[in-house]
Amino acid sequence: MSTLFSPIQLRDLKLSNRIMVAPMCQYSAVDGSATDWHFTHINSLALSGAAMFCIEATGVEAIGRITPGCLGLYSDANEAALEPIIASVRKHSKSAIAIQLAHAGRKASSHTPWDGGQLIPVSEGGWIPEGPSNVPHKAEETPPLALDAAGLKRIVDAFVASTKRAERLGLDAIEVHSAHGYLLHQFLSPISNKRTDQYGGSLQNRIRFPLEVFEAVRATFPQSKPVGLRVSATDWVEGGWDIEQTIEFARELKQRHVDWIDVSSGGVSPQQKIPLGPGYQVPLAQAVKEATGVVTMAVGLITEAKQAEEIVASGKADMVALARGMLYDPRWGWHAAAELGGQVSAPPQYWRSQPSTQKALFGATTFGTR
């Protein structure tokens, strides 16, 4: 039996397989609100065969968006725009729906990637980002505003408010974004965190604010529903955040009953030197899992069914999360199940699509018309 297509339990949420569609920024929202693009994108990938779909990095406040086109969950309008999309997924898919709550910190107010991805000046419609310290992401950029105590409280409150909106929408799980150089990662890394108060300096101080945010989200979301966290396990920069610090952070999260850790890397510095290759981040997930016993997700250039199967079957990670591979093949889960002898859920309108050699793919029997 395929390990990839075996179930896994996260609190009261039982997933039929170990595949998640990773959160992928679409840069297609209007004032933080989802559009028809999101309707198409989310509904399509909710039929991928993955047991869980995670909605893209979603700003908990307007100035916490990466770009003006990023999704948000900070207003009634944002919440209302997601409601019919989620209702449609529920009608046609058995996939669980998670959302990644995020704050971009000093990487906010950026152009979309296809427009260069650089900081948008205030004079051109951008805004002044905030961060743990007044240290810019790039030396030539305008420094962010260093968050004071009131600002930190405001952001924790924003995560709480967005968590309440996620629960009102009936979402199944939340992932707190603490990776890729965004705000919570900025607190973790000594590259971006130069504070001299209780939130800077030592490892225990640098992990303090991300832990406070996680605790607030966990305390707000129903205890029956899981809350995970995405972390960059290394900055890929000497003297930056690394796997040893990540493991200590993961141990603290475990004490706070984190349900999974989604192990990525990089993003906090343009000086990073990433050794790209198939599954290049899997050893990071394996290190966290072996050191802590926390449920881990492996990400990063996982594209082949046998590759994903080996990752979970060998115990390197408990789940895999795919992004670009899912965009390229929106039925990746179907094809993986066919290759590995697993089953996936599909709407009956699609049952006749399965090859004659894969009669058990959807768990359906005959389907005919007069």
Image (tube, helix red, strand yellow):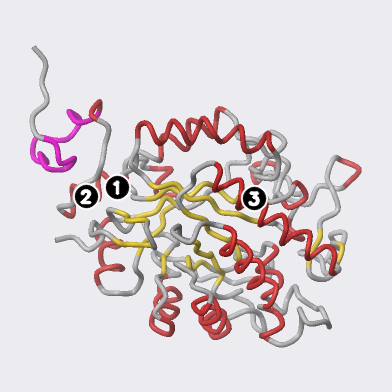
Assess disc 2: are there few (<14), some (14-19) or many (≥20) residues with their C-alpha within 10 Å of its C-alpha.
many
| Disc on res. 337 | 2
Q: Pick whichever, 95 or 160, lies toward us.
A: 160
- In the image, 325 versus 94, the foreground residue is 94
Q: Is residue 361 magenta?
A: yes
- Residue 37's place in the image compared with 147, above or below, is above
Measuring from the top left, give residue 96's x and y in whole percent.
39, 47
Task: Give residue 342's position: percent from left, percent from top.
Answer: 18, 52
Please state which amino acid type lies under the numbered disc 1.
Gly
Quarter of the image where one finds residue 114:
top right
Q: Position of residue 278 (x, y in %)?
A: 39, 64
Image-based side of 141 in relation to 271, left or right: right
Kindly identify the amino acid type of the residue bearing the numbered disc 3. Ser
How far apart marks 3 and 1 lie (CA) works out to: 30 Å
Residue pointed to by mark 3? 162
- Which segment is the magenta one? 350-364
Q: Nearer the viewer, mark 2 or mark 3?
A: 3
Residue at the location (49% across, 77% down)?
A: 254
Decide which of tag 3 and tag 1 comes sooner along the chain: 3
Secondary structure mostly taken by the magenta-highlighted segment of the chain: loop
- Considering every residue shown, the one lying at the far right of the view is 123
**Disc 2 and disc 3 in contact, CB within 8 angstroms:** no
> Which residue matches tag 1?
333
* Label 1 residue SS: helix
| Magenta region includes residue 71 | no
The reply to whether the C-beta atoms of the residues labelled 2 and 1 are less than 8 Å apart is: yes
Q: Nearer the viewer, residue 118 or 299?
A: 299
Amino acid, disc 2: Ala
Q: Report the side of 298 relative to 79 (left or right).
A: left
SS at badge 3: helix
The answer for how far apart the CA atoms under marks 2 and 1 are is 6 Å
- Judge depth for marks 3 and 1 and give the one in front: 3
